[in-house]
Amino acid sequence: MAGYLFRRLLQAALILLGVSFITFVLLYVLPADPVRQIAGRSATQQTVENIRQQLGLDQPLLVQYGRFLAGLVQGDLGRSYLQRTEVSTLIASRLPASLLLMAGGILCELLIGLTLGVIAALYRGRPLDQGLMVTSFVAVSAPQFVVGLLLLYVFAVQLGWFPIGGYGTLAHLVLPAVTLGIMGSGWYSRMMRSSMIEVLRQDYIRTARAKGLTRGRILFRHALPNAILPVIAMIGIDIGIFMGGIVVVESVFGWPGIGQLAWQAIQRVDIPVIMGVTMVSAGFIVLGNLLADIVTPFIDPRIKMR
């Protein structure tokens, strides 16, 4: 166990190192100049060069990257060019909202997706199965802003059940979480259906039926724990995606998460904030996958961590 965790942590460190280098290089070669954003359009060339020198942006790429890594090892993500605030402070202020939305979104997509997937597998080849798979395809294909605006119009504007936007209470969380749940449930339902169909064909399921076990016991005690294993890996990936890639949902519902922070930083070419959000998102993806690998043996004891 200890050896496995050490290897995975070493792999995680190498992955994060690669992500940081690639992101840094891409930002370095961008035609957009962050110094111009800071100085303004009316600034003289001398002012621009002075700001560039103060920020260390006149130094070679490897020198800048080395300075970033040195700060990263110490937990220092740098200072925002435009907001004049530590990046770690900016991210920490948005992190609770992002974590809450991530948890709500994953819960909703699991409840919807797994339920539809299991039902579709039990009625494989029948009209109900076909209808559910068409529904899952529509859910995957629908743009996030369309789903979000539709839910807002129906449940916030017309019915008045939930706030139109904002953050602070459980009522504010429901609609953005359901929007994410609808989008992700399509993938989970299709994967759960395929996995469940394969498990239901196994010999031990036929043996359980021959022993006279009830359908519910076969489904929840024998089939579901084995069919859900591929879904656990997807949850690990979703953790990172939800932490850094739900800009549209956050914008529609006015949710003050990390996604909005990243989008604002990209528009302003605020490189320290972009790097900080990227590293935090990559860290959550690595952490999510590690947790998924640790949880899997507890669900299926046949799987060993080596």
Image: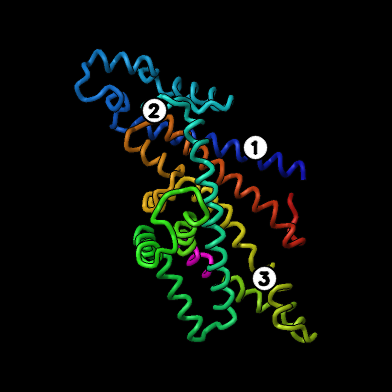
The answer to whether 114 appears left or right of 43 in the picture is: right
Q: Is residue 41 magenta?
A: no
Query: Which three-letter amino acid code belongs to the residue tagged 2?
Result: Gln
Q: In front here: 100 or 119?
A: 100
Chief secondary structure of the magenta span?
Answer: helix
Which residue is identified by label 3?
224
The answer to whether 288 appears left or right of 190 in the picture is: right
Which residue is identified by label 2?
83
Tell me the number on the disc at residue 136: none
The residue positioned farthest toward the left in the image shown: 42
Which residue is identified by label 1?
10
Q: Which residues are magenta?
A: 183-191
Q: Residue at x 46, y 48 (%)?
A: 167
The answer to whether 263 appears left or right of 37 in the picture is: right
Residue 295 location in percent, x, y? 70, 55
Q: Quick one: label 1, few (<14), some, or many (20+) residues within 10 Å? A: few
Where disc 3 sits, the SS reads helix
Q: In front here: 5 or 175?
A: 175
Observer-side mark, 1 or 2, equals: 2
Observer-side mark, 3 or 2, equals: 2
Question: Relative to 220, is 291 above or below?
Answer: above
The residue positioned farthest toward the right in the image shown: 211
Query: Which three-letter amino acid code belongs to the residue tagged 3?
Result: Leu
Where disc 1 sits, the SS reads helix
